[in-house]
Amino acid sequence: MENHHVLFSAAVFILCLSLHCTGSEENFVYSSFADAGEANLALDGAATITPEGLLQLTDKVANIQGHAFYPTPFQFKKQPNGTVQSFSVAFVFGIFSPYPDASTDGMAFVVAPNKSFPGASSAQYLGLLNSSNNNNTSNNMFAVEIDTAQNNEMNDIDSYHIGVDINSLISEKSHPIGFYDDKHGGVFKNLTLECSNCKRFQVWVDYNGETTQINITLAPIKVQAKPTRPLLSVIFNLSTVLTDKAYIGFSAATGPITSRYYVIGWSFAMNAPAPAIKIARLPRLPCPRDNSLQKILKITLPIVNAALIFAIIILLVRRQQRYAELREDWEVEFGPHRFSYKDLHNATEGFKSKHILGTGGFGKVYKGVLRKSKMEVAVKKVSHGSNQGMKEFISEVVSIGHLRHRNLVQLLGYCRRKGELLLVYDYMSNGSLDKYLYGEDNKPVLDWTQRMQIIKDVASGLFYLHEKWDKVVIHRDIKASNVLLDSEMNARLGDFGLARLYDHGTNPQTTHLVGTMGFIAPELARTGKASPLTDVFAFGTFLLEVTCGRWPVSNSAHHGRKMLVDWVLQHWHRGSLLETVDPKLHGIYNDDEVCLVLTLGLMCSHPIPNARPIMRQIMQYLDGDAPLPEFTPANLSSSLLAMMQDEGFDPYVAQYPWSANSLGTMTPEILSGR
Ligand SMILES: Nc1ncnc2c1ncn2[C@@H]1O[C@H](COP(=O)(O)OP(=O)(O)OP(=O)(O)O)[C@@H](O)[C@H]1O
Ligand SMILES: *[C@@H]1O[C@H](CO)[C@@H](O)[C@H](O)[C@H]1NC(C)=O
Ligand SMILES: *[C@@H]1O[C@H](CO)[C@@H](O)[C@H](O)[C@H]1NC(C)=O
Ligand SMILES: *[C@@H]1O[C@H](CO)[C@@H](O)[C@H](O)[C@H]1NC(C)=O
Ligand SMILES: *[C@@H]1O[C@H](CO)[C@@H](O)[C@H](O)[C@H]1NC(C)=O
Ligand SMILES: *[C@@H]1O[C@H](CO)[C@@H](O)[C@H](O)[C@H]1NC(C)=O
Ligand SMILES: *[C@@H]1O[C@H](CO)[C@@H](O)[C@H](O)[C@H]1NC(C)=O
Ligand SMILES: *[C@@H]1O[C@H](CO)[C@@H](O)[C@H](O)[C@H]1NC(C)=O
Ligand SMILES: *[C@@H]1O[C@H](CO)[C@@H](O)[C@H](O)[C@H]1NC(C)=O
């Protein structure tokens, strides 16, 4: 009997540890909800009690709400129409957001006439009200909101605050989450959301019925004693708000972020301080262990990884782009002549502008030194739009690359990129002839013997292209700037075959004329068709250019455009040919050679292709192996007439390059009927 009594008392005592049993239903304490089954909390929505003993108000779902209320109402007013008595609430809450620094939307401790909220909205309405009944006095509701999202509609002060709500989610007063730390002289400690996620906090709500003061106090769970200074203090007469009997409980709602809101402990007392929650008994939140190193690693590792991968990708892409080339199947057969872009890039130090040797009609030419062989090269960057005819062109360039002659600039190979072709040539240390002729870059004046040698060199190079190889190669752009001088001052013809790129590559409708003004044979201008004889025509102009030291076309103020050929021919007619010789030679030259070269130049510049000598003959004349045939412009007229009747006359002839009065009586103007 005695034993029975002791056992019964012990059971009551244990029960009373969690459930404050004194004073009927006027107070209670839950230090865990695992043993609150008896209390029979009214749950709805997403609210559940987890096996660990947590009251979980929302689950991992967006825009949901959950409610948990004490099953029976409390008598807030002792007498009907009386005043609301003093009361005190304490609870421990926690938030578990999938993001460290953001959460939606919030939770609240609520005193309301009903424990269910049909029609209430989630998100900023926290599952309590909706847009139509917000701030309506008939709500009879008092709430303490813990709002984790800033909402302008509710005049929220920030994204993590606590507020006193009367009938409305627009708080009477609110404050950023934090506490006044008694241990440090009562200074305010700001608890931002990012360091609050997954931590537990205790909140005290105290109402004094006489002074109508509402105090809200908050502290992290490790600060066990209630701070002396409340976070928020509001004077509001709840007697004008609450119904005589009212339910107390919690509500929470999610917005777009699927945060979970938890109540971990809860106590309440009417007319007395809320019983202390036993902090040590409180269950933990189902969060990853708060190991700060782990946490830092967890946050930083993916960022570091992503950054590393990103950096590597950027590097690879940039490298790829920098050295990207175009290669096609058909190019395999030309493999050995292909340079890698990387090698050329390295050789020219990334195509630095200080390595530019010159800029021509096709693009820039760079000096480079190949890494492995230490060989000096000239890299010509040719930009081209279309891919059309590229195969033919490259195969031609490559086959031309097999050409080897002491008077040709050796083409070593090529490299192809998108819209760009790089041609690699032997480097010619003395640069191009035009610089000597016109005294650019402080180049010395070439004497006649040097000039004669250069003329013979170019002739032999061109002869080789025309006749010494298994197929005829037309140079298409003979002129002083395409004649380069090697270290021994040997002249070498450069750029051969390159003009074909334009023949192949461009739109046939816009017949792009390749060549340089003054060097274009009339039939080339007319038909666009290059032949060895159009090369001879240009060579003729070149002979005059070298001997006279003048541009093939000059613009004079008095006479308009003046052709060098016309001018030399005039002197030929007058018998004053030697007056055309470059004055920079100071009269020091071999008269016979000069006359030979000038006359040969005129013969080569004959408007009728068949009247021009071929390169084989030119070589013989220059070497003195055959006498120069008598040059009589008179016999031009008959052949000119024959040609015109043959092919149909095109007035274009008149403009190139013999503007005709030099032809005597038979001027193209007369013939054309103008
Ligand atoms: N192999 C080379 N070695 C040394 N310098 C060169 C070489 N090739 C070209 N150059 C220099 O680069 C300049 C430009 O060459 P490029 O052949 O592109 O132009 P161009 O002959 O003046 O005009 P176009 O493109 O119409 O033929 C030349 O004048 C010359 O000074
Ligand atoms: C309480 O007040 C209401 C109106 O405010 C009145 O109708 C009611 O009779 C009052 N009850 C008591 C018991 O005074
Ligand atoms: C609470 O709500 C339920 C259902 O909406 C209703 O039946 C009940 O009368 C309400 N109680 C109070 C006190 O308003
Ligand atoms: C707002 O809530 C009230 C009470 O819960 C309900 O009667 C009403 O229909 C709701 N309004 C809307 C727009 O949901
Ligand atoms: C809420 O309603 C009260 C009157 O009931 C009014 O004075 C107050 O301005 C309203 N607040 C808002 C934010 O609408
Ligand atoms: C407040 O709610 C009551 C009852 O739901 C309604 O009759 C009244 O019109 C509402 N007041 C306002 C200002 O919306
Ligand atoms: C608390 O910290 C947050 C973030 O650092 C800041 O935006 C806010 O203004 C601070 N609040 C107070 C009251 O110091
Ligand atoms: C509110 O806090 C103030 C300051 O600490 C205190 O003087 C007052 O008694 C408190 N009121 C209640 C209802 O706790
Ligand atoms: C609070 O309101 C009630 C009823 O409106 C009133 O009787 C009481 O005197 C008020 N208390 C204070 C402190 O104003």
Image (spheres, helix red, strand yellow):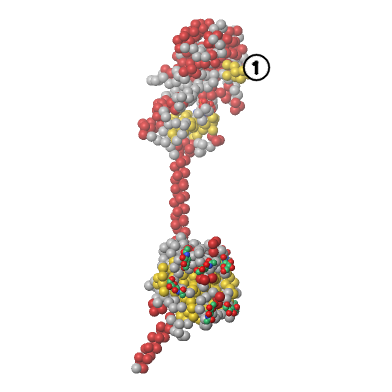
Image coordinates of residue 259 in percent, x first then y, are 45, 64
Q: Which quarter of the figure is the C terminus placed in?
A: top right
Q: Nearer the viewer, residue 141 or 163?
A: 141
Q: Say left or right for 630 vs 40.
A: right
The residue sitting at 43% across, 24% down in the picture is 404
Image coordinates of residue 310 in percent, x first then y, are 46, 50
- Up/down of 291 relative to 602, above or below: below
Residue highlighted by disc 1: 558
Q: Can residue 637 be seen from the camera position used here?
A: yes
The residue sitting at 36% across, 34% down in the picture is 329
Amino acid found under the numbered disc labelled 1: His
Residue 227 picture quarter: bottom right
Q: Which quarter of the figure is the N terminus placed in?
A: bottom left
The residue sitting at 40% across, 72% down in the picture is 49
Image coordinates of residue 63 in percent, x first then y, are 44, 62
Image coordinates of residue 50 in percent, x first then y, are 39, 71
Q: Can residue 447 be seen from the camera position used here?
A: no
Helix, strand or loop under label 1: loop
The residue sitting at 41% across, 75% down in the picture is 41
- Up/down of 220 relative to 674, above or below: below
Q: Say left or right for 159 vs 51.
A: right
